Structures are given as structure tokens and as C-alpha cells.
Image: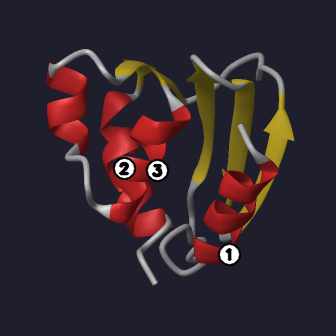
Amino acid sequence: MSSNTLDKLQSRFDPEAAKGMEEVFQFHFSDAGSHYMVIQDGTLDVHEGEHDDPSVSLSMSTDTLKGIMNGDVNGMTAFMTGKLKATGNVMLATKLTSLFPSQ
């Protein structure tokens, strides 16, 4: 995943939306390897690689993630059409757009 995409996500992070959350989002990108985000009570840390016990794992391309985050792609549609695969607490994936709102 390009550091540009990560930087954009970090700059969009809404600490208020993450108050009281303790979750790990694992991303497996078909075109950029694996990264994970640790959200802990309003803070965000992004790491390269794989987490031992993520709350939810999401597999997609970086373009699919960008589309979901900027509103061009509906997350549920991406899931239903196979562009996005999710395991674990799948409902957490629906919180991505509130954790990283459009500017």
C-alpha cells in the first residue's frame, strides 16, 4: 500500500469516532501486501505486516479501498461482488467510513 494512501487515512482519522474502541483492522491488499491498523480509545497506529489476532481481516485491492473511502464504491456492493472479502467481526468494516470521514 502506498504510503500516500496510508497518510491520507491517518489524516482523515476521527479520534472522537474511535473513543472507547479497541480493535485491529487487518488489510490484505492484492497489489500492496499486508498492513494493519490498531485503534485504541481514540488513537490510531498503522503497521506493515500481519497482526496475530485482528478483530477483522479485509482482503481487497488498494483501488477498492480508495473507492470505499471516497464514496465511489459501496462497501456492501464490493463485498457482494467479491471485490472485498472479510473475516472476523465483519460489522466493524462498516465503521471504516465513520472512523475515516471524507474531508
Q: Residue 3, percent across and down? A: 80, 51
SS under mark 2: helix
Q: Between 40 and 103, which is closer to the camera in this rendering?
A: 103
Q: Spatial distance from mark 1 to mark 3, Cα to Cα?
A: 14 Å
Percent position of residue 62, x then y: 54, 36
Amino acid type, label 2: Gly
Question: Can residue 4 be seen?
Answer: yes
Mark 2 and 3 residues: CB-CB less than 8 Å, in contact? yes
**Residue type indicated by callout 3:** Lys
Q: Residue at x 66, y 54 (%)?
A: 5
Q: Which mark is residue 66?
A: 3
Q: Position of residue 85 (x, y in %)?
A: 37, 17
- Can residue 41 be seen in this snapshot? no
Query: Which quadrant of the figure has residue 13?
Result: bottom right
Element assignment for label 3: helix
Q: Where is 9 relative to 74, above or below? A: below
List the residue tagged with mark 2.
67
Q: Which residue is mark 1?
A: 11
Q: Earlier in the sequence, mark 1 or mark 3?
A: 1
